[in-house]
Image (tube, helix red, strand yellow):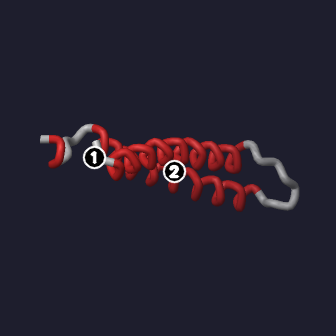
Amino acid sequence: MNGNRLMQQVTAIFSAFMVIFYLGVGWYIAFYFDMSYLDKPVKVIMGSAFIFYGLYRAFRTYVKIVEVFFTKDEDDE
C-alpha cells in the first residue's frame, strides 16, 4: 500500500464524519434551533440545504469508500 492510497482512505473516513456533521447540523437548524430573530421558513430552508448537501456528500463518500477500500490497486497485483 502506498502513501497516496493511505491518504485517500483517511480522507474518505474524514468525509464520512463530515456527512454526519452536515446531517446533524441540518436537522438541528430545521427542527430544534430556536432563535427569535430567524423566522421558521428561513430555519427550514437553511436546515434543508444542510441536509441535502449532507445527502449529496454521503453519496460521494460512499462512492469514494467503495473505490478506495474495495477495489484492487494496479500496483497490488
- Rendered-image quadrant of the N terminus: top left
Q: Determine the residue positioned at 56% across, 50% down.
A: 51
The disc placed on residue 58 is none
Residue 37's place in the image compared with 8, above or below, is: below
Q: Is residue 70 left or right of residue 22?
A: left
Residue 48 in the image: state x and y as whole percent: 59, 54
Q: Using the rendered view, name the quadrant where residue 62 is placed.
A: top left
Say if mark 2 contacts mark 1, CB within 8 Å: no
Q: Is residue 35 left or right of residue 1?
A: right
Q: Determine the residue positioned at 65% across, 47% down.
A: 25
Q: Determine the residue positioned at 84% across, 53% down.
A: 35
Q: Residue furthest left?
A: 77
Kind of residue indicated by mark 2:
Gly
The span from disc 2 to disc 1 (Cα, nearest Å) is 20 Å
Q: Nearer the viewer, mark 2 or mark 1?
A: 1
Residue 70 in the image: state x and y as whole percent: 25, 38
Q: Residue furthest front?
A: 2
* 16 vs 50, nearest the viewer: 16
Residue 19's place in the image compared with 45, above or below, is: above
Kind of residue indicated by mark 1:
Glu
Q: Which residue is mark 2?
A: 54
Residue 17 in the image: state x and y as whole percent: 53, 42
* 37 vs 72, nearest the viewer: 72
**What SS does tag 1 mark?**
helix
Q: Determine the residue positioned at 71% across, 61% down.
A: 42
Residue 13 in the image: state x and y as whole percent: 46, 42
Q: Which residue is mark 1?
A: 67
Mark 1 residue crowding within 10 angstroms, few (<14) / some (14–19) / many (20+): some
